[in-house]
Image (cartoon, rainbow, N blue to C red):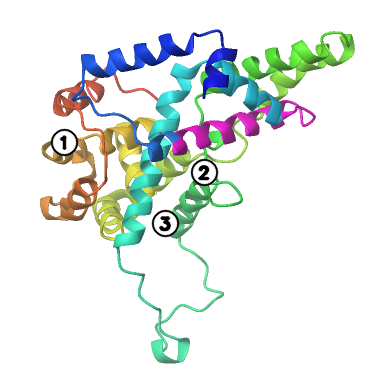
Amino acid sequence: MTDSVSSSGIDPLSARLRELADYLAAPAVGRLTEEQRALSLGIARRLVVDVAERLDRSIDTEGLWREWLRGGLPGADRLARLCFARAEEHRWRDLSAQRSSPPPILPDADEAGADAPSVGTPLSDIDRAYLALQIADRRRFDALGHPALAIADLDGAVFRALLLDIAAWRLAEVSQYQARAAELGEAVRVATERQTEGRGIADAGAAYHKILGAGLSEAAGQAIARHDWPTLIALAAAAHRRSYDDMALALLTAETAALPSLLAPLHLDRTALAPLEASLAMLPSRAVSDDSARDYGEMLAPGRITR
């Protein structure tokens, strides 16, 4: 830690004193736990690597990350909300998986009888939409199962800004090679155009929400009962026409009293919210806004709803 602070031009003692002063100024303010820091940092790293590889597969992503880790990530304010929302959602899902009962074992075909669907039975439109949502969610993990941010889920401005930051870093390496330097601009253009290839979880959730129609309340209630939080978040995001990460953060930081109004567009029975409330209450070190009800009301007010 001393090396990284020194190399960035900040006096280590001054940095420690500033950190201590911030703490003493507000000792009761919740701080990030080591788990929250590690998850968020890992998500940021995987995102930087993914975007860099889309720009140029010959980029030394390890060198890029090491340099940014020492000097600070460009656009850290833009990335903080995304990475924290994804990290907190992952902690929530992981805790729910540990505490919930395993899914029931389905009976064999012989035991199920003639009413059981055969392997070749075509999926309904609703089932296909739900499957697409699950696939979009799976893209939000790396090959080892670690939480990540899918490129298709990023806001276009955030994606382009990160591309340009990486291109600027790469340009310093290849500036003496005119042809390779010129290729970077074209690579940014191509990567930007291809960002939305593959459906993101917000779009998949919007499609699922649309096709459910009158079955929306039942599907949302089942998602809560199964602790299928991505489906619940995606449906709520579609109902409010908000981004997935915004909706995830809204749910994760909501006071219990704010949940009914926050999920009102899903037309859930009050008793259906009980598992959700219990699950959120058990999440360690959860950040809860004191003014959550007011904040969410403003967020969902007419004129603030964007897509």
Q: Is residue 49 above or below residue 230?
A: above
What residue type is disc 1 on? Answer: Glu
How far apart are labels 2 and 3 at the CA level? Answer: 22 Å
Looking at the image, tell me whether mark 2 or mark 3 is earlier in sequence order.
3
Residue 207, percent across and down? 43, 44
Q: What residue sits 26% from the left and 38% below the top?
A: 286
**Which residue is at the front of the view, 221 or 257?**
257
Left or right position of 60 against 268: right
Name the one closer to the observer, 301 or 11: 11
Q: Which mark is residue 255?
A: 1
Residue type at mark 3 is Ile
Give the mark toward the camera: 2 or 3: 2
Q: Nearer the viewer, mark 1 or mark 3?
A: 1
Q: Residue furthest bottom?
A: 110
Q: Is residue 196 visible?
A: yes
Vertical comparison of 155 with 46: above or below: above
Q: Which residues are magenta?
A: 38-60
Residue in the picture at 39% in, 78% down: 105
Residue under label 3, please give it.
126
- Tell me the kind of residue under disc 2: Arg
Say if residue 244 shows up in the picture. no
Residue on which the image places disc 2? 140
